[in-house]
Image (cartoon, helix red, strand yellow):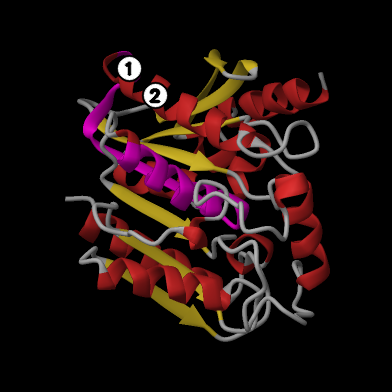
Amino acid sequence: MARRLLLLLLTLALAAPPCLGGSLKASNFRIDSPGGKMWVMVLRPREAGGPLPGILWLHGGGYMAWGPYIAPMTCGPMLAEKYGAVLVYPDYRLSWQAPFPAALEDSYSALQWMYDNADTLGIDRKRIVVAGESAGGGLTASLCIYARDKGEIPIALQLPLYPMLDSEDTASSAHNHGRFWDTRRNHWGWKLYLRELYGTDSVSKYASAARETDYSGLPPCYTFVQDGEPFYEETLTYVRNLREAGVEASVDVYHGDAHAFDMLQPGSEQSREARRRLCEKYVELLK
């Protein structure tokens, strides 16, 4: 009930002209997923003609927190306003509700719903983007791998921003005391998401995308990250693996130790530059 109320409040907020310039209209839908009915929030430009790119935006929160109500904090509305896009934010099950593969299953259900209802939603099926920050970035990578393997829905672009990809410690996630996310929180998030699989050799590539060994055939990728935050190494490794597999991929690195700096420090010079570069790469890669 509380999560539904938050979605309703956000819908009302987005309907008001002062929020996001009043250029986006919010609607809520209940769709089928393996866990039962799931709420998805759709943001669409009020003034838009013709099929638009569809962006499935997977929220962050360590797989255990937050929901579509943080949409105004993310870069999704910016892309929709500047370039015209239909944004879909699924209220996927959090790890305290159900562990892996619940979040992945719900994310794929939202992707399938977007694809099947593209005509009604005004989405161009050839320009479907999957994006997200932090755990949502990890889900983005996992979902792109899962969708490639299933071969049902083409994804044109992935934007896994400072993604939570590796369930094992890396050089930057071990002994990290950065701002907003650190080693202790990271271990807690993965343990809750993986439960009995945590720390074993049985972790699926669909849970931790860093377990993948074949990166061929994945969508072009752009991301950014700070060099002192936990996910620095796994972000660079993911981009390197994509490049070595022949996938167009790039990353911009900023100095600092603030995870999710673009969301939690939106007025900083780095955040403004990160959003500018994201816009550039979005236009460049979404051909």
User: Dot 2 corresponds to which residue?
Assistant: 112
In-front residue for pair 99/58: 99
User: Dot 1 corresponds to which residue?
Assistant: 116
Count of numbered marks: 2
Quadrant in which the N terminus appears: top right
Of all residues, the one furthest to the front in this rendering is 201
**Residue lying at 73% horizontally and 21% vertically, measured from the top left:** 4
In the figure, 24 relative to 74: above or below?
above
Real-space Cα separation, disc 1 to disc 2, in angstroms: 6 Å
**Residue lying at 74% horizontally and 28% vertically, measured from the top left:** 6
Whether residue 46 appears in magenta in the rendering, the answer is no
Q: Position of residue 123 (x, y in %)?
A: 29, 27
Q: Is residue 43 visible?
A: no
1 and 2 marks in contact (CB < 8 Å): yes
* Boundaries of the magenta span: 120-149
**Residue lying at 33% horizontally and 28% vertically, measured from the top left:** 47
**Mark 2: secondary structure:** helix
In-front residue for pair 174/64: 174
In the figure, 106 relative to 119: above or below?
below
Of all residues, the one furthest to the left in this rendering is 287
Mark 2 crowdedness (10 Å alpha carbons): few <14, some 14-19, many ≥20: some
Q: Is residue 33 visible?
A: yes
Identify the amino acid type marked 1. Asp
